[in-house]
Image (cartoon, rainbow, N blue to C red):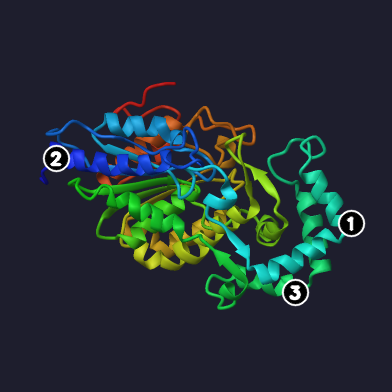
Amino acid sequence: MQTAPTPTAAQIDQAREAIAAYVRQIESSPDRREGAYPYCLFHEPGQPIRGTVMMFHGFSAKPHQMWRLADYLFRNGLNVYQCTLAGHAFVNPDKNWCQVDLKPEIAIPLKEKVAADPVLQASLANLTNPKAAGDLPRPSYLQRMALIARLLRIEPRLLDILKAIERPNDPDFDRYFISSHLRYLTDARDRLRELDSLPGPIFTVGLSVGGAVALALAADQPDRIARVVAYAPLLEIYGEERRKYVELAGPLDIRELGWDPALRFPVGALTANARFGKAYVQQNVRSISRTPVFMVLTENEDAADIETNRKFYQNLGGDRQGHCFYQYPQEDLVPHPMIDPTEVSQGMSNRFWQSLYQETFRFLTTGEVNSSNLRSIDQDAALPAVPPI
């Protein structure tokens, strides 16, 4: 039987100081985003642990999004590092968050055509007026379809540009676009480096874009990451129409509202999410397949494309390679942000959250998952109990 790692005081202090140095860097910025700082939960020196979990929240959210799960894992023998997604510790998303945008020599003429088009200008004015837009966090389906049609009418060349972003390895991508999507990986790599002093396995857990980051870190550091749990990883934006809107609307400077009601972000940030999932995570599926992965989806998706995720799981090698997969059926009313039972999306919340926490713990510690427990609102008595709200 393998001996459980037992971090010393010096090892824990070194990791804490590395994380504290990063927090000081955030605090020194005028763009710091209150409540979005990373934090760690480390057991006392000399206490055996099961390993250390790096957790990555969803797009536009904060580490606090998964605090209940972090607390449960910590109370049951795991160290936890709640990371902040690249740039998300700061406000001013245009400057600080990962983005994909057209190069100036393409974007400026396009914006001039948009500015000269009275139909588009009226539509954009409605989108930026909360009262006219019904105070929705994003444009409606009809609004998106109308914008796509009008954009293609005033600039047919966008069809060729769209092809360059739709294909993960298109050589014309760098001809048309400026992209910082790989910061999701380089930032996660820096966070992992802060844990270099800690003994024992490192696990990654993430939701949505955070799920893509958790997978990407396994591709980048296969000798360091022992297991991955990816909740509804955003490997491609849900729905073809929504994808085309996101890919075409970046130059229009449209803002959308995410989980933080005080913060609007440019559509180009969503393009970066899709680019990261498509051009890095999916393209490195063979590297990721060497690390055991547990993927969780829901039929009630509105962010992560279900078919893309299912295909990705099969490309990993699926069950036959020791990976695990579970998809909540539509009637279970589980939404995309499935981690916290108090988080409501599309009028739904996850009533199966306690069994999900238990199976996350089971997978991290044994590499196995019991689907019967995931289908139950009750808990498995053989696993550590998840306390109620």
Q: Position of residue 297 (x, y in %)?
A: 50, 47
- Number of the front mark, 2 or 3: 2
Which is more N-terminal, label 1 or label 2? 2
Q: Position of residue 200 (x, y in %)?
A: 19, 47
Which is more N-terminal, label 1 or label 3? 1
Residue shown at the point (75%, 49%) measured from the top left: 141
Left or right, 164 with respect to 43, comes to right
Q: Give residue 135's quadrant in the image.
A: top right
Quarter holding the N terminus is: top left
Left or right, 325 with respect to 41, comes to right
Residue shown at the point (34%, 53%) measured from the top left: 190
Residue shown at the point (19%, 39%) measured from the top left: 12
**Crowdedness of circle 3 by 10 Å Cα count: few (<14), some, many (20+)?**
few
Foreground residue, 49 or 305?
A: 49
Task: Say which residue label 1 marks.
Answer: 118
Task: Say which residue label 2 marks.
Answer: 10
Residue shown at the point (43%, 53%) measured from the top left: 213
- Number of the front mark, 3 or 1: 1
Q: Position of residue 125 (x, y in %)?
A: 82, 46
Q: Secondary structure at mark 1?
A: helix
Task: Say which residue label 3 marks.
Answer: 157
Are the residues tagged 3 and 1 within 8 Å (C-beta)? no
